[in-house]
Amino acid sequence: MSNQSLVVTSRNTLLPGSDQPQPATITVNIDTGKITDIQTVYAERSPGGETTFIDAGEKFVLPGLVDAHVHLNEPGRTDWEGFWTAHTGNKADLKLLVAAGVKGFKCFLIESGVEEFPSVSEHDLHAHMKELQDQSTVLLFHAELEDDSCSVQNHEEHDPTAYQTFLSSRPQELEVNAISLITVLQEKYNSLRCHIVHLSASSALPIIRAARSRGLNLTVETCFHYLCLSADDIPHGRPEFKCCPPIRSESNRDALWDALIDGTIDCVVSDHSPCVAELKKFEEGNIMTAWGGINSLGFGLSLLWTEGQKRGISLGQIIRWTSEETAKHAGLSSSKGRLSVGHDGDLVIWDPAAEFKVSKEHFHFKNKFSAYEGMVLNGVVQQTVLRGRVTYDRTQSGFDGFTPIGKLL
């Protein structure tokens, strides 16, 4: 093993336990990819030797973000994005999958729109939760549930290009129904952690708070789009804003921010959910029949910083929601999500003052459209470092020339 190291120094480094950046110099062993030393001083010069030295100056050094909800389909719909996902369709295999390293299982309480991923019933859940309790895993829920008094409405008589038509077709009660059922089931299977993916309905927050007060093993995420977009501002005929559950009103968005601040919501993810352009029905602008999902990889930090500054949110809070808590949720908190000795040397060098207008040239994902196109955002990533190796450099043509070094965790 060599002594090659990466040393990164900055006058503004976000270390654990602090909401504000401070001077620090971080050393990463390139062979192991681990942080070996952190000094809370700014280094004026390279230490020399077998060292790659990055002087970030006034720019910020942050932990790498951990996006715990991204849709990839490979093998499968590789023209959409990434990789095939298992679900709880075969109870007999669940413990074997956990033993093989599967981190968790996702289920829909409403029809998913994907034939091979059907919804589960309350009866199904009893069987699967009984099988999974006391296992080191998590059961994730797309939490919308129809009942006799509330269901998805087609609204065929209304304008399908109007966002309000779609919004009224997926009322908050669907999420309230689902989360109510989940918390009732948790009373019986409380050793199994349950996780609500992409919460959008503020009406469900009292149920979540009550469940937490009873000690139920429940965690919750929301998404960049629910915190940074409002139904009040979505124009007609723009299917790129469609997702399920939907982006809701400004007052709903405010309530989600409050719940994030007080800890009712644990973390924030992208739920990057791509498809090919034809399925978005751009030409006809039909939101009702378009595929639901928002393309957002690469914009989360800038989105939350831009919106969060209006609300007095610190950078430390944002990193806690997008790195520390997401790493914990994914079972990676021993190696990811914070700048600590022994953790992976994953760093972001970031200019919080820089501003950019989102355009297609910023889309590094496959299908080049997004609800965020045209927005002006604050905060620009200058470099990213994965396990001590630079994987993106804005000043050197971005990703060009870098070899992918990702690995299965």
Image (spheres, helix red, strand yellow):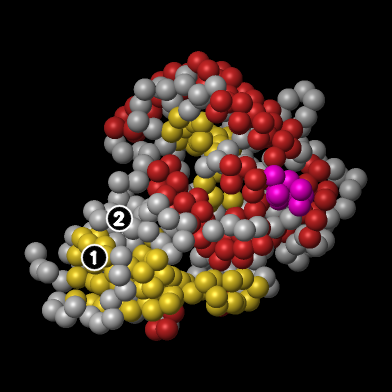
Question: Is residue 295 among the parts visible in the rendering?
Answer: no
**From the viewer's perspective, is residue 388 above or below residue 313?**
below
Q: Residue farthest to the top?
A: 188
**From the viewer's perspective, is residue 285 above or below residue 389?**
above
Q: Which residue does the numbered mark 1 point to in the structure image?
A: 28
Q: Residues within 10 Å of mark 2 (few under 14, many from 20)?
A: many
For residue 340, the mark is 2
Q: Residue at x 80, y 56 (%)?
A: 232
Q: Residue at x 59, y 19 (%)?
A: 184
Q: Residue at x 51, y 25 (%)?
A: 216
> Which quarter of the figure is the N terminus placed in?
bottom left
Which amino acid, by three-letter code, is at mark 2?
Answer: Ser
Query: What segment carries the magenta color?
Result: 246-255
In the rendered structure, does residue 253 fall within the stretch colored magenta?
yes
| Label located before the other in sequence (2 or 1) | 1
Q: Residue farthest to the left?
A: 1
**Element at label 2:** loop
Q: How far across and how far down the image is residue 280, in percent?
A: 68, 59
Q: Quadrant of residue 10?
A: bottom left
Which amino acid, by three-letter code, is at mark 1?
Answer: Val
In the rendered structure, does residue 320 fall within the stretch colored magenta?
no
Question: Is residue 130 among the parts visible in the rendering?
Answer: yes
- Residue sitting nearer the eye, 167 or 387: 387
